[in-house]
Image (tube, rainbow, N blue to C red):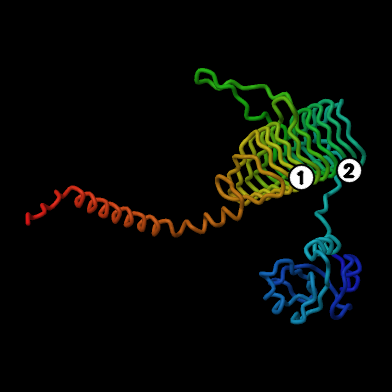
Amino acid sequence: MQEKTLAELAEYVDGRVCGSPNVIIKSASTLGRASEGDISFLANSKYEKQLRTTKASAVIVGKENASAPVPLLVADDPYYAFMQIMVLLHGHRKHKKVGISPRASISDSAKIGVDCHIHSFVAIADEAKIGDGCIIYPGVYIGQGVKIGNDNIIYPNVTIYDECKIGNRAIINANSTIGEDGFGYASHKGVHHKIPQTGSVIIEDDVEIGACCGIERGTLGDTVIGQGSKLGDMVTVGHGTKIGAHCLLVAQVGIAGSTTLGHHCVVGGQVGIVGHINIGNNVTIAAQAGVINNIPDGKVVLGAPAIEANLGKRAYRMIEYLPEMRQNIRKLESQIEQIASSIKSESEKPDEEVPES
């Protein structure tokens, strides 16, 4: 862990200091938990009250705040600046350099790049190719003909089926499966017949796959996870689905087969997306939504079935009033029936006789 002055940190993130530039920063923390020597950040206005009570030695903000009791580091993007400082002060997880364990099972026809660290009980099948600088943890299985690029980290018990392709700098977290057969069956006379899945999975550069994910291989074409996309835990991607670059899929998302997502989409937790639809670029899908139709570029949707967010919010705000509205409607129906009955009774009365003069 490094120590830096606030001035040094400001220079590192291209920001500026309001207050003492000589404050020593040793670590990073949240506004509520920070103590002396910590730097924190304010990126969400709902936490602004904590800025006045924090015990942090400095806070990263997007604009000056005269009421702040501590020195400030003003940056264009406070959260991004915080990330840069976190990496500088703490660094990413360090991986033990073990070389190639004699207890790993590596085919004679597999090719391993330089500076790889392959732990015990890894199994690497025929014709697999591993690039330079890869870290492969215990219990990983890498199938026949798999191609893995440089500087990848593959955590314990990951399974990568045959012929899949992994780019550079990917991270695959524990217990995930890449390239399993897609959920494809032809139902005939009440019996489900398995369809061979002849496609593969392509994971592009800088992708991170969470724990316990399942990425299915395509039936005919490939399943693709685009460059820089990040998948949370327990995400399932169906066969032949294509996810564009720099998408964020939060935990427990399920995407059925042959669906296409554009670039920079954000998909909230527990979203379900049907197969064979197209979702545009820069789309945001709120948590637990059920997506059953195409979504154009730039839309924000929520609900099940998913609809445009502003309409959805109005609809959901009405839910608490539905019981009262139902009672009112019943009262109105009863009143209408009474009025209709009264009119009918009046119409059925015989005309009164006019007396003779």
> How far across and down, in percent of the image, does residue 224 sit?
76, 36
Residue farthest toward the front in the current orientation of the protein: 357
Q: Which mark is residue 91?
A: none
> How far across and down, in percent of the image, does residue 223 sit?
73, 33
**Total numbered circles:** 2
Tell me the quarter of the picture where residue 153 sits.
Answer: top right
* 85 or 15: nearer the viewer: 15
Can you tell which of label 2 and label 1 is closer to the viewer? 1
* 271 or 339: nearer the viewer: 339
User: Residue drawn at (47%, 56%), measured in percent from left and top?
Assistant: 319
Above or below 201: residue 168: below
> How far across and down, in percent of the image, does residue 11 sit?
91, 68
Residue of label 1: 263
Residue farthest toward the top in the current orientation of the protein: 189
Crowding near the residue tagged with mark 1, few <14, some 14–19, many ≥20 C-alpha atoms within 10 Å = many
User: The N terminus is located in which quarter?
Assistant: bottom right
User: Residue drawn at (86%, 80%), measured in percent from left and top?
Assistant: 20
* 178 or 333: nearer the viewer: 333
Q: Is 242 on the left-hand or right-hand side of 285?
A: right
User: The C terminus is located in which quarter?
Assistant: bottom left
> How far across and down, in percent of the image, does residue 347 sit?
21, 49
Tell me the quarter of the picture where residue 187 sits.
Answer: top right
Callout 2 touching callout 1 (CB < 8 Å): no
Crowding near the residue tagged with mark 2, few <14, some 14–19, many ≥20 C-alpha atoms within 10 Å = some
Above or below 4: residue 53: below
**Considering the numbered disc 2 on the image, is that residue within a helix, a strand or a loop?**
loop
Q: Which mark is residue 133?
A: 2
Above or below 237: residue 84: below
* 85 or 308: nearer the viewer: 308
- Gap between marks 2 and 1, in whole Å? 28 Å
Q: Is 2 on the left-hand or right-hand side of 69?
A: right
